Image (spheres, grey):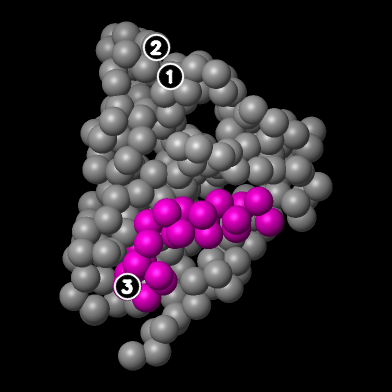
C-alpha cells in the first residue's frame, strides 16, 4: 500500500490528537496504509511522558490569559511548544514494514530534515548521544517525539519554519537548558512558503518510507 499524505491546514491540537488515535487503531487493524498528517496548530504546550511542569515558565493564569492549552500526551520527551508557522507532522506508520526499530525510524526522520535544510543552504546536524532532533549550531530546528502501539507510531515532528520564537520563552524547550531554538526564517532572513516545505517533506517521506506490497 502506498503512503497517504493528508494536508490538514490549521487544526486545534485536541482534534488532531483524536484523529491520530483513530488512525493508529485503523493502521493496527491494517484498514489504512501508512499515513502522514501535515498541519499547523494554534499555540499549545504538550507534555511528553518525561515532562516536568517546572519547565513551563509561565503561571497557569498567564497561560489562561494567552489562551494557551497544556496537554499531556503519550509521546516521549519533555515539554514542547506548537504554534503557527511551525510545520507539525504525525506519521501513523507500521514499523513492521520499516525495520521494526524505533531508533532507526527517528534517525531516518532526522535525515529527511537535514536533507531539506541543506537544500536551503543550512548546515544542519543531529546530536550524538541521547538528544533527538535536528540542530543548526546549538539551536534546535526540528523536534521529535513518538509513541508506538503494536509497532504503529503516532506523534512525530515539529519543524520551526516561520515560528514566533518568542513563544519558546514560555518553556524550557524539550527540557534542554543548554540549547536554544531557531527557525528557518530566522536563519535565512526571510519568510518561507509553508506549502513549499510541506510538499518537499511529503516527497521525502514517500522516498524514505516506501509502501510495502501486501
Q: At x 69% / y 31%, what residue is drawn?
A: 137
Whichever of callouts 1 and 3 sits on the residue coming sooner in the sequence is: 3
Report the front residue among 140 and 42.
140
Q: Local crowd at mark 3 within 10 Å, few (<14), some, or many (≥20)? A: few
Q: Residues within 10 Å of mark 1 (few under 14, many from 20)?
A: some
Task: Residue at 23%, 52% (x, y): give it.
Answer: 18
The residue that label 3 is drawn on is 96
Q: Which residue is mark 2?
A: 57
* Position of residue 200 in the picture relative to residue 40 (left or right): right
Write the residue at 51% across / 54% down.
107
The picture quadrant where one finds residue 151 is bottom left
Q: Are marks 1 and 3 in contact (CB under 8 Å)?
A: no
Work out whether residue 66 or residue 128 is closer to the camera in this orientation and state it.
Answer: 128
Q: Position of residue 9 (x, y in %)?
A: 47, 53
Find out whether the residues at labels 1 and 2 contact each other: C-beta distance under 8 Å: yes
Q: Is residue 54 left or right of residue 130?
A: left
Q: Magenta residues, as a range?
A: 92-115
Percent position of residue 161, x then y:
62, 41
Q: CA distance from mark 2 to mark 3?
A: 40 Å
Does label 2 or label 3 sit earlier along the sequence? 2
Q: Element type at marker 2?
A: loop
Amino acid at each position: 500500500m502506498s503512503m497517504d499524505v493528508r494536508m490538514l491546514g490549521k487544526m486545534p491540537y485536541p482534534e488532531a490528537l483524536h484523529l491520530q488515535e483513530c488512525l493508529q487503531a485503523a493502521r493496527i487493524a491494517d484498514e489504512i496504509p501508512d499515513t502522514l498528517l501535515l498541519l499547523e496548530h494554534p499555540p499549545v504546550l504538550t507534555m511528553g511522558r518525561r515532562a516536568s511542569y517546572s519547565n513551563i515558565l509561565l503561571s497557569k493564569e498567564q497561560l489562561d490569559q494567552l489562551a494557551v492549552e497544556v496537554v499531556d500526551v503519550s509521546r516521549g520527551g519533555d515539554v514542547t511548544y506548537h504554534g503557527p508557522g511551525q510545520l507539525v507532522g504525525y506519521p501513523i506508520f507500521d514499523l513492521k514494514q520499516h525495520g521494526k526499530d524505533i531508533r532507526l525510524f527517528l534517525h531516518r526522520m532526522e535525515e529527511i530534515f537535514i536533507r531539506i535544510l541543506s537544500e536551503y543552504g543550512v548546515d544542519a546536524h543531529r546530536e550524538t548521544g541521547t538528544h533527538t532532533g535536528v540542530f543548526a549550531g546549538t539551536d534546535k530546528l526540528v523536534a521529535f517525539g513518538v509513541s508506538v502501539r503494536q509497532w504503529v507510531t503516532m506523534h512525530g515532528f515539529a519543524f520551526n519554519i516561520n515560528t514566533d520564537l518568542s513563544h519558546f520563552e514560555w518553556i524550557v524547550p524539550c527540557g534542554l537548558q543548554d540549547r536554544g531554538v531557531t527557525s528557518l526564517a530566522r536563519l535565512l532572513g526571510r519568510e518561507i512558503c509553508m506549502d513549499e516545505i510541506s510538499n518537499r517533506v511529503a516527497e521525502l517521506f514517500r522516498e524514505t518510507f516506501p509502501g510495502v506490497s501486501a
